[in-house]
């Protein structure tokens, strides 16, 4: 039963940890950086006495790269956002009149989503989906005839749809004959090739569309969109590069829009200029992850403690490492055999060291224990009851800590008020347990238990204070299930401890 329980706990904890770390890409290192991209699209509009309507494509909300922050800026123009079924978004600015020239801006900051999904899930074939934005514009009857003739030739050469699509892109890009040049209408570049290829494939009943985006490896003030082709293969959209004609994964491209419309269009006025700027910078992975928590549509598995208020996070950062300190304590007592005061007293002392520092905490502990033990022996002669004696000891410890604070400040030792943060209750109970052990078992056993408590406290403090440990358990609290399983497994150990091997060494030698 215990083995099954431990296995289940480890499987759940380790499985969830692996999924969030490897698939969702939660940061494993506290100082790990992640790239984010800042995009700005600006369209300049001249003055017009009549009404004006300006529309501009902006990156899809559910694309491969998800927006962290977005701004839609304009002067004296109202804004609406339109979203098509294929995920494309248009920002539409309108104004009754423009007495002077103005500009409309889109600014967005993007990070790469851990679960890659270029468009929202579709349960029907794209040809059955109504769309606000057509994939292709109508062409003349002559162009349709040429497209059909070209596809008839390519069908005889192609092995499958992938080969057919690649041959079509090659032929349109090279423009080696009239069948290819006529649909292109004299245009060159990736955009007309992608749009024409989508048109030709759609004429043959094969769903395809041109996609336009920004290459993320090219940053600067003059970024220009590039185009590629997407073809529906029955299960999803398959991307094809125009320059190579081969299928590829557009993981390094930020999608702006789909179809053969222009990036920015105007009614009642004109677009004087469209400028695109892209910048990349590195930020801490935890910072980027905390910004991702603002998405209300994220799955529950993406939820982290970063959703909580900052004060709550600070408290949980301490609470989450307490089981690690307890695990160190269990190992030291069950496997090493180090005697300690109480069950969890060393862990409490280790927590006290976090309020000061290791060296300062040890000095405070030694000084206060020396003063406290002196008064404890004096109080024992007065035959006081337990509760009044503990209350008196607590008061003495408070006065001792105040004295240490004043003394440290006078000599500019840098401890200051941190001395007073050393928990007085822990010191009180430590002194009481030390005194009781001294009286019942003698100074030797009391010294051993005190030294053991300090050693275990230092070891627990060292492990709990590791930045990597704090980061892992804060970002992946499911690891506590693994810690729980290890503790349960340790509970069945009944063999020799390391400290007992020396005691039985002579017996093993005689046998």
Image (spheres, grey):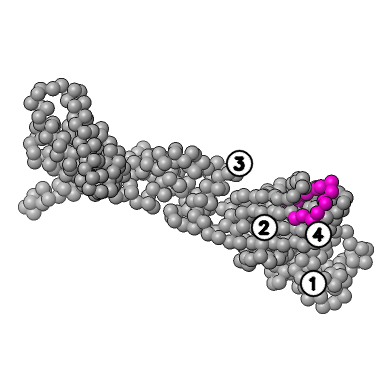
Q: Position of residue 367 (x, y in %)?
A: 17, 41
The residue pinned by badge 3 equals 296
Dot 1 and dot 3 residues touching (CB under 8 Å): no
Q: Is residue 340 shown in magenta? A: no
Compute the Cα span from label 2 to label 1. 26 Å
The residue pinned by badge 1 equals 188
Q: Quadrant of the N terminus?
A: top left
Q: Which mark is residue 40?
A: 2
Q: Position of residue 505 (x, y in %)?
A: 10, 51
Q: Secondary structure at mark 3?
A: loop
Q: How dense is the environment of label 4, judged by Cα within 10 Å: few (below 14), some, or many (20 and up)?
A: some
The residue pinned by badge 4 equals 271
Q: Mark 4 or mark 1, which is nearer the start of the sequence? A: 1
Q: In this view of the protein, can residue 127 be seen by the observer? A: no
Q: Position of residue 419 (x, y in %)?
A: 27, 41
Q: How dense is the environment of label 3, judged by Cα within 10 Å: few (below 14), some, or many (20 and up)?
A: few
Compute the Cα span from label 1 to label 3. 43 Å
Which residue range is magenta in the image? 84-103
């Amino acid at each position: 039963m215990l083995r099954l329980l431990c296995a289940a706990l480890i499987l759940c904890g380790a499985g969830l940890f692996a999924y969030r770390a490897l698939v969702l890409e939660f940061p494993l290192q506290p100082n790990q950086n992640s790239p984010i991209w800042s995009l700005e699209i600006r369209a300049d509009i001249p003055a017009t006495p009549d009404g004006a309507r300006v529309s501009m494509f902006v990156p899809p909300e559910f694309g491969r790269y998800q927006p962290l922050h977005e701004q839609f800026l304009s002067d004296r123009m109202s804004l609406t956002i339109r979203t098509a079924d294929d995920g494309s978004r248009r920002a539409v600015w309108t104004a009754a009149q423009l007495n002077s020239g103005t500009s409309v801006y889109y600014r967005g900051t993007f990070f790469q989503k851990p679960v890659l999904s270029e468009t929202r899930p579709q349960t029907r074939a794209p040809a059955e989906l109504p769309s606000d934005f057509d994939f292709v514009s109508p062409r003349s009857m002559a162009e349709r005839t040429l497209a059909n003739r070209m596809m008839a030739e390519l069908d005889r050469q192609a092995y499958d749809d992938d080969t057919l699509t690649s041959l079509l892109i090659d032929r349109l890009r090279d423009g080696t004959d009239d069948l290819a040049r006529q649909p292109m209408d004299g245009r060159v570049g990736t955009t007309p090739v992608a749009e024409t290829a989508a048109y030709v494939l759609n004429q043959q009943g094969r769903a395809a569309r041109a996609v336009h985006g920004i290459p993320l490896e090219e940053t600067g003030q003059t970024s220009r969109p590039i185009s590629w082709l997407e073809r529906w293969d029955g299960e999803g959209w398959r991307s094809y590069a125009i320059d190579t004609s081969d299928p590829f994964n557009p993981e390094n491209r930020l999608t702006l829009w789909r179809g053969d419309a222009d990036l920015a269009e105007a009614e009642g006025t004109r677009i004087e200029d469209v400028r695109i700027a892209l910048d990349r910078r590195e930020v801490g992975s935890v910072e980027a992850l905390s910004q991702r928590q603002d998405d209300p549509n994220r799955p529950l598995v993406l939820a982290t403690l970063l959703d909580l208020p900052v004060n709550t996070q600070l408290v949980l950062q301490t609470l989450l490492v307490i089981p690690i300190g307890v695990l160190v304590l269990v190992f030291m007592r069950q496997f090493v055999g180090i005697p300690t005061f109480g069950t969890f007293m060393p862990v409490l002392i280790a927590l006290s060291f976090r309020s000061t520092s290791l060296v300062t905490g040890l000095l405070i502990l030694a000084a206060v224990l020396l003063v406290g033990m002196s008064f404890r022996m004096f109080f024992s002669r007065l035959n006081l009851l337990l509760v009044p004696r503990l209350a008196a000891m607590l008061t003495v410890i408070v006065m001792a800590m105040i004295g240490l604070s004043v003394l440290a400040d006078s000599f500019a030792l840098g401890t200051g008020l941190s001395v007073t943060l050393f928990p007085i209750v822990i010191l009180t109970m430590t002194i009481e347990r030390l005194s009781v052990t001294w009286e019942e078992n003698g100074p030797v056993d009391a010294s051993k238990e005190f030294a053991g408590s300090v050693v275990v406290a230092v070891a627990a403090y060292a492990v709990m204070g590791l930045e990597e440990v704090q980061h892992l358990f804060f970002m992946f609290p499911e690891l506590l299930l693994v810690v729980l399983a290890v503790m349960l497994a340790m509970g069945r150990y009944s063999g020799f401890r390391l400290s007992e091997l020396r005691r039985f060494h002579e017996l093993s030698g005689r046998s």
